[in-house]
Image (cartoon, rainbow, N blue to C red):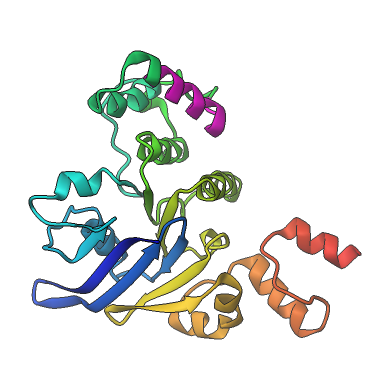
Amino acid sequence: MTILKINNLNYSRDDTIIFSNLNLNVFKKDYISIIGLNKSGKTTLTKLLCAIIPTDNIFSINDIFLNKQTVLDYIEHIGVVSNSLNIFLTKKVKDELILPLKNLGYNELKIKKIINDLITFFELEDLISKNTNELTKDEATYLQIIIALVHNPEILILDDAISSLPLQLKEKILLKLKKLNEKGLTIINITSDLETIYDSNKVYLLNNKSIEELGNVEQVFQEDNYLRKLGFKIPFIIDLSIKLKFYGLLDKIYYNLEALEENLWN
């Protein structure tokens, strides 16, 4: 079932064409990654998807076409996280999570249950009582992801949201997102960081003002020379897997160092 459509997107800014005839269908429970280098239009695409930049009947979610009259209905279905938007409205982490639920009119009992579930799932025991101005940049990013999910959106859009995080936290977040995707959350990961695409069922390339489907993750990394030529950095574990596979020491590409080591030892 198609959940989100982009229909023939053409967009220019300051007489510069950013997108030309861009089309995309995203299906329910998809976990897609849209990869692009700097200045390929990643953040602009995010702003268009989230109605920050106005459009008229180009985007649709569940057959709700985005325009001036439908914008509130449209954005109810979306949660968005950007690495440039770590802005908080309250002093306490817990209050930051409660605020959007209050705005939605939830009663105290329902709010308490949602907050407790979030604390458990995202392991927030050490974070929940902190002041928002005390958070490290990494903690703030983690909190922004949770805030984007607090109202239970159908689609989560990530705009290079976790690319700058240390590997351990990045892997923790990706594991949580994978579990949520398995439960029904549709994820659109817009990124330049190939370490964040491993769990995607489809990968697209944002290039030359349009979008191209590259296939699944394994197919993408089989085209590593193409990605290098474009300017992407191949993750260490992928690069190592490709070299070992070339010499006949592996039969496939590995995305996890522990799994690769276990295979080699066996």
Residue 241 located left or right of residue 34: right
Residue 230 located left or right of residue 123: left
Residue furthest top as drawn: 108
Q: Which residues are magenta?
A: 111-124
Asked if the magenta segment contains residue 176, the reply would be no
* Magenta part, dominant SS: helix
Q: Which percent across, then down, holds residue 29? A: 47, 55
Quarter of the image for residue 224 reads bottom right
Position above or below: 123 against 66: above
Q: Which percent across, then down, holds residue 253? A: 70, 72
Asked if the magenta segment contains residue 117, the reply would be yes
Quarter of the image for residue 44 reads bottom left
Position above or below: 196 against 234: above
Q: Which percent across, then down, holds residue 184? A: 48, 48
Closer to the camera in the image, 177 or 249: 177
Position above or below: 249 against 58: below
Say which residue appears at 23% left-offset and 71% top-offset. Answer: 7
Q: Which quarter of the rendering shows the N terminus?
A: bottom left
Say which residue appears at 35% left-offset and 68% top-offset. Answer: 25
Say which residue appears at 59% left-offset and 47% top-offset. Answer: 175
Quarter of the image for residue 88 reads top left
Q: Which quarter of the rendering shows the C terminus?
A: bottom right
Residue 57 located left or right of residue 124: left
Q: Which percent across, then down, holds residue 177? A: 51, 47
